[in-house]
Amino acid sequence: MAQRQSNNSDPTFTDEEVLTIYVFGLIKKRTTISEIHEYVEEHFSEWFPDLPSYQSYNRRLNRLSAVFAPLVEEGLSEVGCKKTSGEMIRIADSMPIMLAKGQRSSQAKVASDRLASVGYCSSKDTFFHGVKLHLVVERRFEQLPVPERAGLTPGSENDLRALRRVLPTIEGGVLCGDKAYCDGPLKERLAEDQNLDLLTPAREGQGPEYPPSGR
């Protein structure tokens, strides 16, 4: 599926292990590479006896950054969709992938020449140096959502700006998001041109998104 990216053609610690640990760490809600490495080192050393130091692991993971896009595409190709576009309920959201956070974010240099930059995570009320993972997923009844679109941007990228890039490919149904995606003119245009209903909470100072029932 993905060509090996590391310089060593037969390393003791494989690229597959590098990627597996990273994805597993994200699933376990570890938001930085250092937290993921520490978590695996403390709890899964028997599974990964050749786990390298944090610095070496971080370098290996950065060299494999180009692998993530085809991995997502391959995963999406395995998922079928039976609903018509008009019936779909989609959710847009983002999450930070923090290479450094807090006071360290302004001095961090990891991957600055590629994609990483300083951003702010409102849900955690912290600045971070890293990237953002953006997702548009399809809601499914009593099942995990199915990712439809996924992408990485610099940590400083505005969520709505990132969403605008994929909106032309989305037709029909409902798209839900938080206040970061609130844009009145955009909502009207999507409803008229793409039959897509963008639902977000109202920003402070705006009226409610929905009129009271019976009106």
Image (cartoon, rainbow, N blue to C red):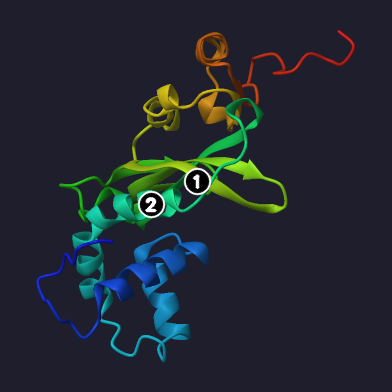
Under circle 2, the secondary element is: helix
Q: Quadrant of residue 169?
A: top left
Q: Quadrant of residue 201?
A: top right
Could you say where residue 72 lies in the image, as x and y percent from the top left?
38, 52
| Residue placed most toward the observer, 123 or 16 | 16
Amino acid carrying label 2: it is Val
| Residue placed most toward the observer, 115 or 9 | 9
Q: Please tell me the numbered disc located at residue 186.
A: none
Q: Quadrant of residue 153?
A: top left
Amino acid carrying label 1: it is Pro
Q: How many marks?
A: 2
- Residues under labels 2 and 1: Cα distance? 9 Å
In the picture shown, does residue 86 fall above or below 149? above
In the picture shown, does residue 190 fall above or below 67? above
Could you say where residue 77 lies in the image, as x and y percent from the top left?
42, 49
Residue tagged by mark 2? Answer: 72
Q: Are marks 2 and 1 in contact (CB under 8 Å)?
A: yes
Could you say where residue 172 lies in the image, as x and y percent from the top left?
57, 23
Could you say where residue 161 lies in the image, as x and y percent from the top left?
39, 26
Judged left or right of residue 147, residue 100 is left
In the picture shown, does residue 198 fall above or below 15? above
Residue tagged by mark 1? Answer: 147
Q: Residue at x 23, y 61 (%)?
A: 64
